[in-house]
Amino acid sequence: MPTSPRQEPTLSAHQAPSDSLLQAVPGAEATGQRAAPRSTPGMPPQASRPRWLRRLLWLLLALLLGLGGAVAALWWWLGQPQSLAQSLALAQRWLPAQQQLQVQQVQGSIRHGGRIGQLHWQGPGIE
């Protein structure tokens, strides 16, 4: 048996809009319940996700974008011609007091390679 497409009820001149809602929902007349309107004109539909979830997703997106930007900046710096010399200068400052690193004639980058003319590392028991 072919089914016909569902037809929405129409309002007659003497029917109130609330009566049409009762007719539009099957079984609503028997229980006296009113159907909730699908959307009210002029008002945005209610969000499907809770507000805290949206905020959490935006926070995660911001963190991922920040992390991606930091990785991209580091990758760019590692390719710069002075990155090898700068990283060795940083290593000299962070070594413990009893260790010493001396470098001369440093050129090149960490990512693309470079040359170190002389490297001397001193420490307890190492020379």
Image (cartoon, rainbow, N blue to C red):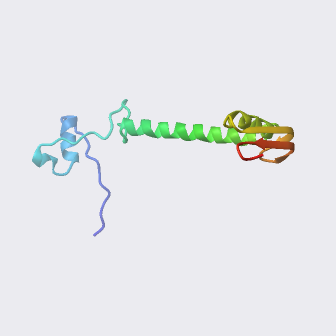
Viewport quadrant of the N terminus = bottom left
Work out whether residue 81 can be spotted: no
Considering every residue shown, the one lying at the far bottom of the view is 1
Nearest the eye: 43 or 21? 43
Q: Quadrant of residue 10?
A: top left
* Quadrant in the picture for residue 99: top right
Left or right? Give the position of 72 relative to 17: right
Q: Residue at x 77, y 47 (%)?
A: 111
- The residue positioned 83% from the left and 39% from the top of the image is 103
Point 16% across, 47% down: residue: 28
Q: Nearer the viewer, residue 31 or 73?
A: 73
Q: Position of residue 65 (x, y in %)?
A: 58, 39
User: On the picture, is 66 further left or further right than 72?
Assistant: left
Q: Indicate the position of residue 25 as horizontal and vertical percent values.
A: 21, 48
**Image position of 5 (left or right of 111):** left
Res. 125 in view: yes
The answer to which image quadrant residue 90 occupies is top right
Count all numbered tags in the image, as a single digit: 0
> In front here: 29 or 123?
123
Q: Position of residue 36 (x, y in %)?
A: 24, 40
Q: Farthest residue in the top direction?
A: 42
Q: Is residue 124 left or right of residue 5?
A: right
Pick whichever, 68 or 50, lies toward us: 68
Where residue 11 sits in the image (x, y, percent)? 24, 39
